[in-house]
Amino acid sequence: MGKIKIFLLFLSLYCLGPCAAIPIISSSTDESALLAFKAKITRDPYNILQKNWTAGTPFCNWIGIICSHRHQRVMALNLSSKGFKGTIAKEVGNLSFLISLDISNNNFRGHVPDELVHLHRLRGLYMQLNELSGQIPGSFGFLNRIQELFLYNNSLTGPIPPAIFNISSFQVIDLKYNFLGGSLPMDICNNLPNLESFNVSHNQLGGQIPQSFSRCSEIKFLDLSCNEFTGSIPGKLGNLSKLEQLYLGNNSLTGELPSTIFNISSLTLLTAEFNMISGSLPHDICKKTTRLVTLYLFENQLGGQIPSSISGCRSLKHLSLAHNNISGVIPAEIGNMSALQSLNLISNNFTGELPFNFFNISSLTKIVLGFNRFTGKLPEDLCFRHPNLEFLEIESNHIFGSIPSSISLCSALSVLALISNYLTGGIPPQIGNITGLQDLYLGDNNLTGSIPAEIGNITSLQHLILGDNNLTGGIPAEIGNITGLEYLYLSNNNLTGGIPAEIGNITGLQYLYLSNNNLTGGIPAEIGNITGLQYLYLSNNNLTGEVPFRFFNSSSLMTLFLSSNGLSGSIPNDLCFRNPELQNLVLEQNQFHGQIPSGISHCSAMDTLDLSANEFTGNVLDNIGNMSMLRNLVVGQNNFTGIIPPSIGNMSRLLILQLGINNFYGKIPPELGKLPILEGVFLQANQFTGEIPPELGQSSSIGRLYMQSNKISGEIPPSIFNISTLRELDLSGNQLSSFSVS
């Protein structure tokens, strides 16, 4: 009896404070609270409340309301996904019989009302997927029957109130995707014996991960990812015998990976990517975690080798150890992991031959081994061993030999044909899931030989990367059969012959890289069929003929590199109208001629304009001042003429001004000294006259200044030598006089 008196005394004292009087229990109180809730709704796109929630009608029949049979009181309020906009009325706290409150997936704003503390019967609170702000009310610690709290995907700030971790009835707490800060209490699980799921990912929480998580003995799901946690991973997490999923990625965790975590036999997922975890993988990593399906430890500082015991993870489907310092060879035992679907070991220090000799894992869809030191050849039976392969990335290794023509067997049609040869019964339903190889990355190796024409049979390809090898021969016309290709990179090889017109069949191509080869002939007009082309690199070949610029009908074209060829023609007047997104136009070292059209100024997104070493004439600078985004203006070694207009001072982003070896004349504008990031000024071998403007000495960025071989006269301004960033200066071949240093 004494305990009850003490509780009533505490409650009466508490309610003298910020909370109002205990609501009077009556059905009219519920109706008033619901109408107050309705009054705070500013948008009701389906007129649910407007038409249905009407005073004078039984509120137990209103949409979203469930009442108790005995008392006819509101037990549940469910208005999720109704498109509501507004704030939450504090009167909701008067619904004293409420067990479940669900207003999720709407557009509620403002704070979570403190008055919800009156809902002593509340079991579930669902306010996720709204636009709520402010802090989580500390009074929530008095909701002593609550089991589920969902506040994720809002804009809540401040710390998580420690009081809520004293509610022993809690089973699920989900606060992800907010802006919560502070740290978790060190005794977080001392009073949470029933907690099964805890998610605070994508917040701003810091400090160390509490050791006391080990006392949440019922927890199955723990997500602390995408925060600012520091320190090491507590080894006591290994005591969570029912834990199934543990997310620790995207924090600042250090120390070694505790081997105790791999004692949790129920564990199916462990992610700790993007941290600074060191040490090596436990030697008995999969001895007890036989149910593990996903293991993501990429972007850390792990060393050592992959233990052969990893083959004990017979259920493992997804393994990523990318971007670490792991070395040695891949253990042959990994070939026994028959469930494996994706293997990512990119950017480590692995050595030895490619592991395909022991890879008999037909379930593999993704193999990523790039940026290591693997050697060996691609096996002829690669696609037979891996009929479900969709992604193969072995860039930047030491692979040699030729690309096997059998690579074509990685197409969906070829896989189906192979399977049909061995079918004795009906066609299994999962056969429809075979998509074929979509991404093939073999760049930056020592591959030789030609590109097999059979590669055109892999019509499922979206990305084909064969650049930076020693491939010879021509580009097979069959590539044009891969109509879904988006990215084609063949640069930096020894390819010969012409650019096949069939490439124009790949109408969805966005990236085309053919630079640094020995390609000859002209640019086929059919490339103009590729209306979505964004990046075209054809530099450093032996291409000739007039460039059919007018076929560039792609409004999305951003970069065009044609430098160091034998191409000719002129720039069309409507280039920038056709290609308003053009950022980089590089035509250097060709035989282009004619004047620069006034329409060039409509390329308002232009970053780099390089027309150097051609045969252009006229005045390129007339309209350049309007190109406010231009950083690099390189037009040297042409026959340009005219003056540098003062409007060049408007080009605040200009980094390089290269006008050398032309016929420019007039005075050097003082406005050059005011450009904030101008680093290189190349005006050599022109007809400039007058004096060097002393305003150049005001520059805080010029590092290279070349004015030699002009007709500049007068004294050299002493201010020039005040440019602290100046590294290279050449004023020779002018009519300058000496100066005196004061």
Image (cartoon, grey):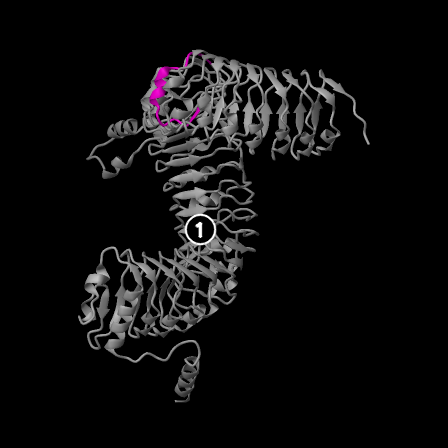
Residue 194 x %, y %: 39, 67
Q: Residues within 10 Å of mark 1 (few under 14, many from 20)?
A: many
Side (left or right) of 666 relative to 558: right
Residue 533 counted in the magenta span? yes
Residue 301 x %, y %: 56, 44
Closer to the camera in the image, 495 or 382: 495
Q: Quadrant of the C terminus?
A: top right
Side (left or right) of 169 relative to 631: left
Whether 168 is drawn above or below 687: the answer is: below
Residue 287 x %, y %: 45, 50
* Residue at 19% in and 35% down: 426
Q: Quadrant of the N terminus?
A: bottom left
**Quarter of image, res 102:** bottom left
Span highlighted in magenta in the image: 519-536
Q: Amino acid at mark 1?
A: Leu
Q: Is residue 651 visible?
A: no
Q: Which residue is mark 1?
A: 270
Q: Is residue 583 visible?
A: yes
* Residue at 53% in and 37% down: 348
Side (left or right) of 535 relative to 351: left
Q: Secondary structure at mark 1?
A: strand
Closer to the camera in the image, 221 or 236: 221
Residue 250 x %, y %: 49, 49
* Residue at 35% in and 38% down: 363
Mark count: 1
Whether 441 is drawn above or below 278: the answer is: above
Closer to the camera in the image, 666 or 584: 666
**Quarter of image, res 419:** top left
Residue 112 counted in the magenta span? no
Closer to the camera in the image, 421 or 5: 5
Whether 556 is drawn above or below 147: the answer is: above
Whether 370 is drawn above or below 272: the answer is: above
